[in-house]
Image (tube, helix red, strand yellow):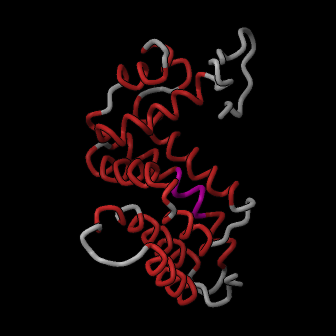
Amino acid sequence: MASSTSRTGRPPKIDADGVATRGRLLAAAVASCVSLGFEGATVADIAERAGVSGPAIYRHFGDKAELMVAAGRGALDSLTNRAGGRLDPAATARLYLSPEFADTRRLLSELHLAGLRHPEVAKLLADWHRTHAEEWDRRFGGPHPSATTKTFFALLLGLCQIDALSALASSPDDVAECMDDVMRSLFPEEDHR
């Protein structure tokens, strides 16, 4: 994932697979958080996983919290891109349930729990939520768009815990079908294809 801002001077370092340092740092942040949790993930571990020095992180991100939230934002941006850029609640919920989103679910869970203990994480998450809430509020309209958006976000955060419920017997397809029903109830005006 290339930075959206361009820097003058030296171009970003690219690894053998063509991935720039920023992209490697984002991927390493996800992997570290999934393995060690938010508190256990360290700048040193993330740097090692990305194949860079610790100080290289600070050329791209202010601190670990900023890096971790950027990793979560990047994952959700890619989800929106996979949905064709269309804000579709049912498709978004289905993507949250997909196996390839498992690491992102864990990252998002860790970030939101860390937000309860770390004010800097809470602030970054609040800024992120506000940005996306404005887009969804415009999309939903209706008498209470903010309440609808908040409910939708809460459902998505709940889906981040789906892996913790493995003791409950149900197929992924059955869970997805139930979530489709919830989406139809919450968004009756949507075209649920």
Which residue: 29% across, 67% down?
166
**Picture layout, residue 91 above or below residue 68:** below
Question: Along the horizontal axis of the image, is 187 left or right of 42?
Answer: right
- Was residue 132 drawn as part of the magenta stretch in this picture? yes
Which quarter of the figure has residue 105? bottom left
**Picture layout, residue 75 above or below residue 162:** above
Which residue: 67% across, 89% down?
189
**Picture layout, residue 163 above or below residue 72:** below
Q: Nearer the viewer, residue 157 or 7?
A: 157
In the image, farthest residue toward the top:
10
**Residue 157 spot, x, y in % from top left:** 41, 64
What is the quadrant of the N terminus in the image?
top right
Q: So how many labels did they put on this image?
A: 0
Which residue: 46% across, 44% down?
124
Which quarter of the figure has residue 95? bottom right
Question: Along the horizontal axis of the image, is 171 left or right of 128?
Answer: left
**Residue 91 spot, x, y in % from top left:** 62, 70
- Which secondary structure class fits the magenta region best? helix
Residue range corresponding to the magenta coloring: 128-133
Which quarter of the figure has residue 8? top right
**Residue 55 spot, x, y in % from top left:** 45, 13
- Was residue 119 drawn as part of the magenta stretch in this picture? no
**Picture layout, residue 90 above or below residue 10:** below
Question: Along the horizontal axis of the image, is 8 left or right of 95?
Answer: right
**Residue 187 spot, x, y in % from top left:** 60, 85
Which residue: 71% across, 34% down?
4
Q: Nearer the viewer, residue 52 or 173?
A: 173
What is the quadrant of the C terminus in the image?
bottom right
Q: Nearer the viewer, residue 167 or 59?
A: 167
